[in-house]
Amino acid sequence: EAGVTQFPSHSVIEKGQTVTLRCDPISGHDNLYWYRRVMGKEIKFLLHFVKESKQDESGMPNNRFLAERTGGTYSTLKVQPAELEDSGVYFCASSRGPRTYEQYFGPGTRLTVT
Amino acid sequence: GIQVEQSPPDLILQEGANSTLRCNFSDSVNNLQWFHQNPWGQLINLFYIPSGTKQNGRLSATTVATERYSLLYISSSQTTDSGVYFCAVEGYGNKLVFGAGTILRVKS
């Protein structure tokens, strides 16, 4: 079975621009998560989808970040406008169920805002 | 919220040596996972181990849930084992809370 995929692998944008990250979960996984690691800090939870619904978005840093999951399949995370402090690695993960289920991570998107 | 502490923060090994990485957590957990972040930044699942002991080749892990800690053992280390090792736990809610990681460098 194919793993979690993310696109692009690396994005370099200027401050003020918009970037959209995409995540395709493992087929059949209803639960999709976004995490990020900004420079020198720990990996932090951003939000959790169950199918197309946002279950928990307590980790979203501010309203410049917008996540969607159309039809409960792939998900996008848009940053608009990007700021320097948004630079880091954005990870997507998926799991078959919530709680007690293993989360599988994608390779990440490295975002650099200049 | 739940706190996760990993030790040691840094570790340098000679190839062939063994090591033990520790993860302490502050509350009951439903899920505990160990990851290896390779030099390309990818998070590789090592173990899903909320309790008990598991082994996979040269790696093994033990979680003692009642005492709120987990250990990751690496035997006969190789240079390809270098990278950052993360422990992550899921307490209340469905999100994983990550420790700060252990940076492992294996020298040839």
Image (cartoon, coloured by chain):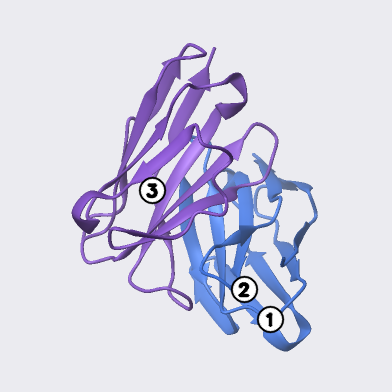
Chain colours: A purple, B blue
Q: Residues within 10 Å of mark 1 (few under 14, many from 20)?
A: some
Instruction: Judge whether residue B76 can be spotted in this image.
Output: no
Q: For mark 1, what is the residue?
A: B28
Q: Residues within 10 Å of mark 3 (few under 14, many from 20)?
A: many
Q: Which residue appears at 65% of the width and 54% of the height? A: B16
- In-image side of A14 versus A3 (left or right): right
Q: In what element is the residue under mark 3?
A: loop
Instruction: For mark 3, name the chain.
Output: A
Q: For mark 2, what is the residue?
A: B91
* Relative height, residue A53 to residue A98 (above, below): above
Q: Residues within 10 Å of mark 2 (few under 14, many from 20)?
A: many
Amino acid type of disc 3? Answer: Gly
Asked if marks 1 and 2 touch (Cβ < 8 Å), the reply is yes
Question: Gap between marks 3 and 2, in whole Å?
Answer: 22 Å
Instruction: For mark 1, name the chain.
Output: B
Asked if marks 1 and 3 touch (Cβ < 8 Å), the reply is no
Amino acid type of disc 2? Answer: Gly
Q: Which residue appears at 78% of the width and 49% of the height? A: B9
Q: Please give the label number shown on residue A106.
A: 3
**Horizontal and vertical percent for residue A16?**
49, 14
- In-image side of A33 versus B60 (left or right): left
Q: Quadrant of residue B19?
A: bottom right
